[in-house]
Image (tube, helix red, strand yellow):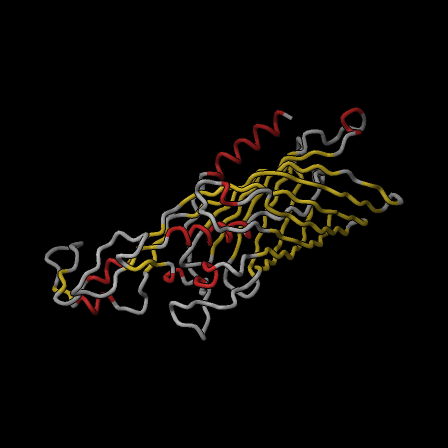
């Protein structure tokens, strides 16, 4: 039990502060639509009578979208509390679906649609994201289990890279504590990569309880439940709010007097101010899950559903208007 606590604490502390910046690849998000015109509520920038339009970054919309996207990146709970044992190895694949609030204006604005104008966005954004996932788990001494996973979003260039450590403090007891349901603590992290406009890392800690039911000594069914918090960390994001305007060409700059000097524009240079930053933040959410895991000789399979326990806006860093989410997954694997 002491080894479990030390290992989980060290991994959690290290992963919580692990930075995951945005990376290139995803073309489906248009964060430049998250903008407020100068002079409007929420934008303190003054209107320039002699220049082009000026905008501020719409921070609340960005936070709503990042919070929902982050929940889709949470580690899927597809295994019961009981570990695979020292020397055991398990490899498998998972398909999971996570619901989105397709009625929300931030999803309509942020998703590209060829038939819509820049301001209109997408009238029919996706109602869910589907992830395809490969995962491997290795049993370790002292009731520990290490896992690694790689996921890809169906139909896009978004990827998830994740790792987890599970501790089963009472594994190996055959009497006394061994008569109780299995208990495990799972600490995990996942990084969202593949997007040039948004990045995120999601970290969590889950308590899992399960009880295996033997079937003719060749198979077993293990219903399980879990509960735990997760933290969605979104780094600061730099976005051009007017991507259709060439700020350099409209500026017509003079040669710089020294390296690193700001441009000295002959014409209108106001569009340079439309390169805005969306502030980074951390959102905390609580989720629970129920599932059932089956094993027949070497073959394993599971199904699980997980959902928000409370409104996301219960966290002070998440603005109102973010709906609760749920996800469901199916997994198949082989155990050695």
Tell me which residue sits at (59%, 60%) in the image.
Answer: 130
Is residue 331 among what the camera can see?
yes
Q: Tell me the quarter of the picture where residue 141 sits.
A: top right
View extreme (left): residue: 257
Above or below, 62 against 165 in this view is below
In front: 71, or 205?
71
Left or right of 279 in this view: 49: left
Residue 59 in the image: state x and y as whole percent: 37, 51
Left or right of 129 in this view: 117: left
Residue 235 in the image: state x and y as whole percent: 40, 47
Left or right of 234 in this view: 99: right
Above or below, 289 against 22 in this view is above
Residue 182 in the image: state x and y as whole percent: 73, 34
View extreme (right): residue: 216
Q: Tell me the quarter of the picture where residue 318 sits.
A: top left
Is residue 336 among what the camera can see?
no
View extreme (bottom): residue: 115
Residue 240 in the image: state x and y as whole percent: 32, 60
Above or below, 102 against 200 in this view is below
Name the quadrant of the N terminus.
Answer: top right
Tell me which residue sits at (46%, 51%) in the image.
Answer: 64
In front: 220, or 272?
272
Tell me which residue sits at (61%, 51%) in the image.
Answer: 326
Q: Tell me the quarter of the picture where residue 3 sits.
A: top right
User: How many numbered discs sit on the rendered protein?
Assistant: 0
């Amino acid at each position: 039990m002491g080894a479990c606590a030390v290992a989980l604490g060290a991994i959690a502390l290290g992963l919580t502060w692990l930075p995951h910046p945005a990376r290139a690849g995803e073309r489906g998000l248009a964060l430049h639509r998250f903008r407020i015109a100068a002079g409007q509520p929420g934008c303190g920038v003054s209107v320039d009578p002699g220049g082009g339009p000026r905008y501020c970054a719409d921070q609340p919309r960005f936070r709503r979208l990042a919070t929902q996207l982050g929940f889709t990146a949470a580690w899927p709970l597809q295994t019961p509390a009981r570990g695979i044992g020292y020397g055991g190895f398990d490899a498998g694949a998972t398909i999971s679906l996570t619901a989105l609030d397709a009625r929300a204006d931030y999803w309509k604005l942020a998703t590209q649609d060829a038939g819509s104008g820049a301001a209109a966005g997408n009238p029919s954004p996706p109602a869910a994201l589907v992830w395809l996932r490969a995962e491997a788990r290795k049993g370790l001494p002292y009731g520990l289990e290490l896992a690694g996973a790689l996921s890809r979003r169906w139909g896009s260039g978004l990827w998830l890279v994740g790792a987890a450590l599970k501790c089963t403090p009472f594994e190996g007891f055959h009497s006394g504590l061994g008569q109780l349901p299995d208990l495990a603590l799972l600490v995990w992290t996942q990084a969202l990569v593949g997007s040039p406009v948004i990045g995120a890392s999601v970290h969590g800690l889950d308590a899992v309880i399960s009880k295996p039911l033997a079937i003719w000594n060749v198979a077993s069914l293990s219903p399980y439940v879990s509960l735990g918090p997760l933290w969605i960390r979104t780094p600061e994001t730099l976005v051009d709010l007017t991507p259709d305007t060439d700020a350099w060409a409209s500026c017509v700059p003079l040669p710089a007097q020294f390296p690193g000097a700001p441009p000295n524009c002959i014409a209108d240079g106001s569009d340079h101010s439309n390169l805005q930053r969306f502030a980074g933040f951390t959102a905390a959410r609580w989720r629970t899950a129920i599932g059932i895991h089956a094993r027949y000789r070497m073959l394993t399979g599971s199904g699980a559903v997980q959902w928000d326990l409370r409104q996301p806006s219960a966290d002070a860093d998440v603005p109102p208007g973010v709906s609760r989410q749920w996800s469901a997954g199916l997994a198949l694997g082989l155990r050695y």
